[in-house]
Amino acid sequence: MSPAKPARRKRTKAAPEARGLAPPQLAGASPPAAVGRLAEAVATDGGVVLAAYRDPLGGHWQLLAGLPVERVAATPYQRDLSDAHVKRLADAIHRLDRFLDPVIAVRTADGTYWSPNGSHRLAALRALGARSIVALVVPDPAVAHRILALNTEKAHNVRERALEVSRLERGLAELDDRPEREFETEFEEPALLTLGLCYQQNGRFAGGVYHSVLKRIESFLAVRLSNALEVRRARAARLLALDAAVDQVVAALKARGFQSPYLKAFVVARINPLRFKRGAKAEFDDTVEAMQAAARKFDTGKIRADQLAGAAGPPED
């Protein structure tokens, strides 16, 4: 009998090194001139500065301010408003009779305050007839674009995430036309950029069933955003054409009596050339072309009910 192996000791993680500012430092110095000018602009716009302070981690100056509701607008990059979510939120604020969750805002040249993460709260306050909203006003306009990486006010599904980053890429192309791969933090993952354009053309597009494939054949592009958008539009067109071919197979399976929310996921899995190549990467065009060819040759007559019962994957959106 072999001797028992000694138990491995779990390594204890070292405590993170202290960083940032101590509480007295958050408001312990005079704000720079740019913050003073922003405070004057807030007053000119009909708002009021409640405090100027430094954020506790990076020490960046920002304002806590009350702004006229009509001056605040959601950035165009965010998820679509959910009427049900706005109604629930407005009802909760009304019952509590308090607004305790300031939005983030960035002032634009025309005196509008863009909020990159507060569209539902803003809509709820407007539904209640509120005249003002409390906001953290950040002097750096780039925050309006980068804040999406921190926006966790509710879990995103693939559709919402894809629409957000696709809209953001289009907006950034006009403001900061650097190569796409320099925006990895803002865009989260390259597959979402192509999927977002598909959703914009077809609101009922079942992007979830293609997501796992795209994550293996997409990468951030080295070209500028304006050029990357053209590549993304061409890829979206190819993906929509593939989806049309898959829909024909799904329709044929339904005609044979198969009924399942996983039919499309089943078909996509069967025609995926990377299905049994764990960790393999491939080119976008080659993979989509192979999947289209496989969809055209798909023999629905050979599919058995037990094969579908054992299939896994996301249902159609």
Image: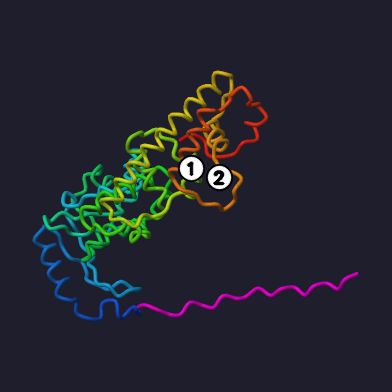
**Image disc number at residue 274:** 2
Question: With respect to residue 294, does 274 lie above or below?
Answer: below
In the rendered structure, which amino acid carries the disc numbered 1?
A: Thr
Tell me if residue 6 is in the magenta stretch. yes
Mark 2 belongs to which amino acid? Leu
Is residue 272 magenta-colored? no
Q: Residue furthest left?
A: 44
Please tell me which residue is depicted at 22% across the width and 62% down the height of the picture. Answer: 141
- Would you place residue 258 above or below residue 137 in this image? above
Instruction: Say which residue appears at 25% left-offset and 44% top-offset.
Output: 128
Please give the range of residues in magenta: 1-20
Residue 94 appears in the picture as rendered: no
Quickly name the residue at label 1.
Answer: 287
Tag 2's secondary structure?
Answer: loop
Q: Is residue 134 above or below residue 269?
A: below
Crowdedness near tag 1: few (<14), some (14–19) or many (≥20) residues, C-alpha within 10 Å:
many
Question: What secondary structure prevails in the magenta region?
Answer: loop
Quadrant of the frame with the C terminus = top left
Marks 2/1: CA distance?
8 Å
Residue 167's x, y, as percent?
Answer: 29, 47
Q: Earlier in the sequence, mark 2 or mark 1?
A: 2
Residue 247, position in %: x, y? 47, 28
